[in-house]
Amino acid sequence: MLDAILFTKPPILLRSVYRKCLWAVNTTDKTLYLTFDDGPIPEVTPFVLDQLKKYNALATFFCIGRNIEENPEIFERIINEGHSIGNHSYDHLNGWQTDNDTYYSNIAKCGTTLKNYYPGYNSPLFRPPYGKLKPAQYKFLKNRYKIVLWDVLTFDFDQQVSEEKVLNNVTANAGPGSIIVFHDSLKAQQKVEYALPKVLEHFSAKGFKFEKL
């Protein structure tokens, strides 16, 4: 079973087994790929967008379908400001705990929601909630979506991880082509508000740019 969530930087063996997943972008350019999971929500997503705008940074938002329906204005702002969108299921289902047909249907339901609220939506990007997929789910989905995982996990969702550790997880591990996971969620709010501006400042000063997937 795929459980990528245990590692700040997933090990090479895990990446090689699930090689159809996108873990990082193959580049030597000073480019980073910020991603945000679980939004959009009014308490966090506008703050994230404001910070990105300050640095002319683009990012990728893996959205929950239910949150799109509840916050269409924020979702529209993400699109209007040039960011890319990915599917994160409709109800943030854990693949390990969900039967396959229900899991696939929930992903498809999110896809329908994305198209309803973003008529130009044609992205194949999908990130499994919790980074968890059964082998059969991986086999089924890898040929239908670009499964995006990560090179650096911030652990901003973990109540046992300090704000400073979240920041260090990024500054100590990210490099050219890294896909970095933050969360625009209530659980991560305090750590995102602390770490995201500092990450943007730190890497911008080093000449990095931030692009969308």
Image (cartoon, grey):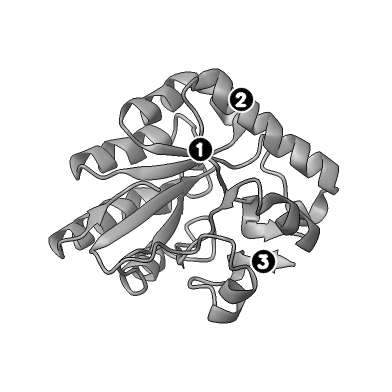
**Residue position for label 1:** 123
Q: Amino acid at mark 3?
A: Asp
Residue type, mark 2 in image: Thr
Q: CA distance from mark 1 to mark 3?
A: 24 Å
Crowding near pointer 2: few (<14 within 10 Å), some, many (20+)? Answer: many
Q: Residue 104 is drawn in which quadrant?
A: top right
Residue beneath label 2, please?
113
Please state the horizontal and vertical placement of residue 203, each as a whole percent of the image: 22, 61
Image: 33 above or below 60: below
Q: Nearer the viewer, residue 48 or 150?
A: 150
Say what secondary structure mark 1 lies in.
loop
First-in-chain label (3 vs 2): 3
Q: Which mark is residue 3?
A: 3
Camera-nearest residue between 117 and 66? 117
Residues at discs 1 and 3 in contact (Cβ within 8 Å)? no
- The CA distance from mark 3 to mark 2 is 27 Å
Q: Nearer the viewer, residue 135 or 190?
A: 135
How many other residues sit within 10 Å of disc 3, few (<14), some (14-19) or many (≥20)? Answer: some
Q: Position of residue 154 (x, y in %)?
A: 45, 62
Q: Helix, strand, or loop for circle 2?
A: helix
